[in-house]
Image (tube, rainbow, N blue to C red):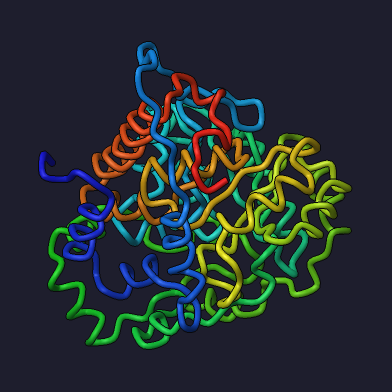
Amino acid sequence: MAQVLEIADLKKLAQRRVPKMFFDYADSGSWTEGTYHANESDFQKIKFRQRVAVDMTDRSLASQMVGQDVSMPVAIAPTGLTGMQRADGEILAAQACEEAGVPFTLSTMSVCSIEAVAEKTTKPFWFQLYVMRDKDFAGRLIDRAKAAGCSALVLTLDLQILGQRHKDLRNGLSTPPKFTPHHIWQMATRPGWCLGMLGTKNRTFGNIVGHAQGVEDLSSLSSWTAEQFDPKLSWDDIAWIKERWGGKLILKGILDPEDAKMSLKTGADAIIVSNHGGRQLDGAISSIEALPEIVEAVGDKVEIHMDGGIRSGQDVLKAVALGAKGTYIGRPFLYGLGAMGKKGVTKSLEIIRNEMDITMALCGKRDIKDVDQSILKRY
């Protein structure tokens, strides 16, 4: 643990401890992965202004996201198959977030179910919804999230059809995963991972199997998921979702100012500037490049969050400086989870917190609420 100094260290550990098909699932983008890599590299173009001889005592990263107190403007992004990075992965990550004082967002395509995570946590978490063709099932998902005490609903808008991810195809990853001799060999080389999986009952998509009509086991899951993502999803669908949910609603997948303006009509509490981690439209601009224009278009009318490419606390600080009220990390916490389980998720959050705190101080600020474009050289 003492040698883990940055998110890249967790990534290296995770790659050694997680079977290749599941590590690659988390660590990949669509097609050429151009947007996936731009999400990271575009942060490097933004430079800080160093300030000296200023009071750096009594610093605070405490903030709010959709009215909820957070220890820093960071939440865990919803990620599918989290429980395949480490046994009971969603539960472990949610517990780490609870202790760290940041929101955890559970994916519709999680391995551990809404109820399983709620049973093992004491504070509300957020739930991410994919809208399926089966609207009754989507409605029941919303109802289950309400019953579990989830405090915000994150509605993903950019996965009406699935972007092609070459690594998954080459690895033969499917829904549900098929365990060929090649896959079994991959898992056999990761004995710690195997032992963890043998010790848990959470090995499928817990929110779907036994809840969706006609999906009672793994064998019936593949055909259901192939047909269920709704390509007809429109702005009009948000009205019934908002009404049925009745709580804080966050729209995820906004990358264009015109869509940001459209989102204002829905009454959503926040939008997430996001390109799905570079896993959907390859060739789209990075999230951090899209952020300033969206802030300019709608910044004072809706709370703006962002995700995509964040690998450090410095990245979080840059996003906040450009107008984001909150950020989400996906791969950094997955690397931590795959590397060291719950301790690894905690470590990823600690790394980001420490980097953000020190950088904020060296830029001459003591409170995250005072961070704006004045700390940046580029803008």
The part of the image, by quadrant, that contains residue 305 is top right
Quadrant, the N terminus: top left
Residue 259: x and y in percent read 79, 59
Q: Is residue 264 above or below residue 290?
A: above
Residue 372 left/right relative to 33: right
* Residue at x 46% of width, y 83% of height: 32
Residue 368: x and y in percent read 50, 26
Q: Is residue 359 above or below residue 179?
A: above
Q: Nearer the viewer, residue 368 or 276?
A: 368
Q: Is residue 196 above or below residue 93?
A: below
The part of the image, by quadrant, that contains residue 201 is bottom left
Residue 88 left/right relative to 9: right
* Residue at x 81% of width, y 59% of height: 258
* Residue at x 66% of width, y 51% of height: 141
Q: Nearer the viewer, residue 342 or 65?
A: 65
Residue 363: x and y in percent read 41, 30
* Residue at x 43% of width, y 41% of height: 48
Quadrant, the C terminus: top right
Q: How many marks?
A: 0
Residue 29: x and y in percent read 46, 73
